[in-house]
Structure formats: C-alpha cells, structure tokens
Amino acid sequence: MVIETMQKEHIGYNEAMRAFGITARGQIQKWESIYLTEGAEGLAVEHRGRGSKGRPAKLPPKAEEDMLAEVQRLRAENAYLKNLQALVLEDGRQTRKKRW
C-alpha cells in the first residue's frame, strides 16, 4: 500500500514515512525494490532469512539406469585392468628369473 501510494501521489520516501508512521527509510526502499521487480504479489511473499536450497531434483529413471550401467561397466573394466596389470607384472618377474 505504501509503494502504490508513493507512485500514485508522486511522493518521496520522507513524505511516505511521515504519512504511514514508518521510521526506517531502508524498509520502504526494500519494499519498493520488491514491488518493482516482482509486483504487488512479491510483497506478500516472505523475504526474510536465507532461501532453502531444498533437495536436489531426482534424475529421470532412464538417466539413473544409464548411470548405474556405466558404473557397472567401469567397475568391470577396472577389475579387468587390475588383473591384466597383475599378469604383466608376474610375466616380468618370470622373465627376470629365467635370465639369471
């Protein structure tokens, strides 16, 4: 109501403070900023404190299945590479023993 009155009657902050009995000029400036960006409906919304980040959005089922399949494939590849590395190391040890 304060901001709408200010705009209709073209009055400043000081006059609005006297007319409505408001002691904080900054409060009127905040209301005006909210009114200009969000409209009159924005003043009905609570703006105090930090906004909630909430829970992260869930992935679609198809994306989740794809990710699980990728993880399983990478685990299998990792196990294969570990076995391959162990075989290469074992082969290297055996060739060193044969030389001596």
Image (spheres, helix red, strand yellow):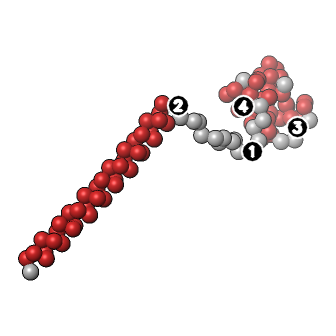
The picture places residue 4, in percent across and down from the top left corner, at: 80, 22
- 55 or 26, nearer to the observer: 55
Give the Cα distance between marks 2 and 1. Answer: 32 Å
Q: Residue at x 32, y 49 (%)?
A: 77
Is 21 left or right of 27, judged from the image as shown? Answer: right
Q: Residue at x 26, y 64 (%)?
A: 86
| Residue at mark 3 | 22
Q: Depth-wise, is mark 2 or mark 4 nearer the camera?
A: 2
| Quarter of the rendering occupied by the N terminus | top right
Q: Earlier in the sequence, mark 2 or mark 4?
A: 4
Give the Cα distance between marks 2 and 4. Answer: 35 Å
Give the Cα distance between marks 3 and 2. Answer: 50 Å
Q: Earlier in the sequence, mark 3 or mark 2?
A: 3
The picture places residue 28, in percent across and down from the top left corner, at: 79, 35
Amino acid type, callout 4: Ile
| Residue at mark 4 | 34
Do labels 4 and 1 touch, CB within 8 Å?
Answer: no
Q: Residue at x 52, y 31 (%)?
A: 61
| Residue at mark 1 | 49
Is 63 left or right of 81, judged from the image as shown? Answer: right
Give the Cα distance between marks 4 and 3. Answer: 17 Å
- 56 or 21, nearer to the observer: 56
The residue most toward the top is 8
Q: Depth-wise, is mark 4 or mark 1 nearer the camera?
A: 1
Helix, strand or loop status at disc 2: loop
Helix, strand or loop status at disc 1: loop
Amino acid type, callout 3: Ile
Q: Earlier in the sequence, mark 4 or mark 3?
A: 3
- What is the number of the mark on residue 60? 2
Q: Does residue 48 appear anywhere in the picture?
A: yes
Q: Earlier in the sequence, mark 1 or mark 3?
A: 3
